Amino acid sequence: MAMTITEACGAMAAARGDAIVVATMSAMFAFDHAGLCDGRLNSVPLMGGAAGLGLGLALARPDRRVLVVDGDASLLLELGSLVTVGTQAPPSFLHVLARNGTQFTGGSNLPVPGHGQVDFPSMALAAGYLHAQRIDSLAEFTARLPGLMAERGPGFVELAITPAPARFGPVLAQTEVPDLQFTRMGQEAVALSAWLGAAPR
């Protein structure tokens, strides 16, 4: 049985230890809304950016575990990052894919191209990840997560996620996206620079 993104993020928050979490899209909002953002979370409110940022952190700080929480629509925009991660092979890198088959889940729920057809774990293995698997239930994910966090990476886990109900459609028009997301990108960049000891530009 598939899990919700909030359940999956709750499991990761409980098991993360001192790992740095880089979350994007629906995972970012799930961490926020569940009160799981505690200063060790760097969010990327931009599709396609999580794996690259996570890789940079893993290379800059090989002493810290990096947990990237990605989305299927987002990963389709950054498939080349799988090869980059596989080539660099950061041992402390775990890439979790929340696969719900929708873009803008909980909003317009547009279908993700290739859903049910594209095999992301096989792509990760072919790109050079050391291990990759699919997990379909919260119970299995919770039980296996500590081992996955401790295992040498880069690793990849695809989670079966139930999409949130759509709020927008033909009857109810989608509201304008506020500038808050773009403001947050700047805030996260400043916070990340401070954490790395670099002066913000």
Image (cartoon, rainbow, N blue to C red):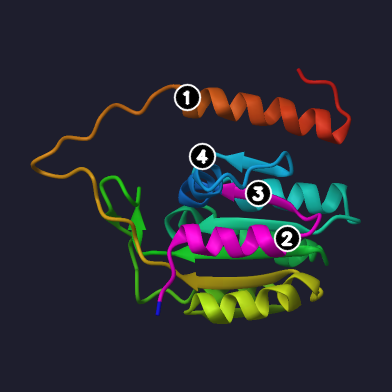
Q: Residue at x 33, y 56 (%)?
A: 164
Of circles 3 and 2, the one toward us is 2
**Residue linked to disc 1:** 180
Earlier sequence position, callout 1 versus callout 4: 4
**Residue linked to disc 3:** 22
Earlier sequence position, callout 3 versus callout 2: 2
Q: What's under tag 3, amino acid-wise?
A: Val
**Residue linked to disc 2:** 16
Q: Nearer the viewer, residue 80 or 21?
A: 21
Q: Nearer the viewer, residue 190 or 201?
A: 190
Residue 161 appears left or right of 37? left
Please provide percent x and percent y for residue 201: 76, 17
Q: Is residue 154 visible?
A: yes
Spatial CA span between label 2 and label 4 = 23 Å
- Tell me if mark 4 has few (under 14), some (14-19) or many (20+) residues whose alpha carbon lies within 10 angstroms of its own: few
**Residue linked to disc 4:** 46
Of circles 4 and 3, the one toward us is 3
- Name the quadrant containing residue 49: top right
Earlier sequence position, callout 2 versus callout 1: 2
Spatial CA span between label 2 and label 1 = 27 Å
The magenta segment: 2-23
Question: Tag 2's secondary structure?
Answer: loop
Please provide percent x and percent y for residue 90: 81, 63
Question: Tag 1's secondary structure?
Answer: helix
Spatial CA span between label 1 and label 3 = 19 Å
Spatial CA span between label 4 and label 3 = 12 Å
Residue 95 appears left or right of 74? right
